[in-house]
Image (tube, helix red, strand yellow):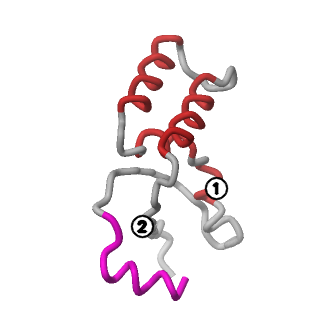
Amino acid sequence: MSEEPKFLRLTVELTVEVLDMEALQAAALAEIRHPDADLSDEERTEQAELVASDDTGASALQWLIEPDHVLQLVDHIGEIEPREAVLGVEPSEGLSEDEDEEHDHA
């Protein structure tokens, strides 16, 4: 077996429906304002404005997803080591026909 490192990129796509935009934004704002958030006052203000002005909820949701939760997808696999994680949240037009059918198999 070759000694060259081998890398695999895991792609997960998840569509969620926002049920309560105000509550989602409020939860994100609470995270941004939390004393443990590693943000300067200027960054805190900038992020709060971004969340409050984003009517899609994408900015708020991104603040609420913990990287450790994503890594739990592979945490139990001893033969691999997570090296990089990138998370993006963006607006969606809703469920595609394929997503609607696949939901029953999850």
Q: Amino acid at mark 2?
A: Glu
Residue pointed to by mark 1: 69
Disc assigned to residue 13: 2
Q: Amino acid at mark 1?
A: His
**Residue 84 at what x, y percent from top left?**
49, 53
Q: Does 28 sit above or below residue 57?
A: above
> Does residue 14 appear to the left or right of 97 in the view shown?
right
Residue 97 location, quadrant: bottom left
For disc 2, the neighbor class at 10 Å (few under 14, some 14 to 19, many from 20) is few
Real-space Cα distance between discs 2 and 1? 15 Å
Question: Within the magenta stretch, is there residue 96?
Answer: yes
Residue 34 location, quadrant: top right
| Of residues 84 and 99, the one drawn nearer to the viewer in this rendering | 99
Q: Where does the magenta region start and end?
A: 94-106
For disc 1, the neighbor class at 10 Å (few under 14, some 14 to 19, many from 20) is few
> Does residue 84 appear to the left or right of 79 in the view shown?
left
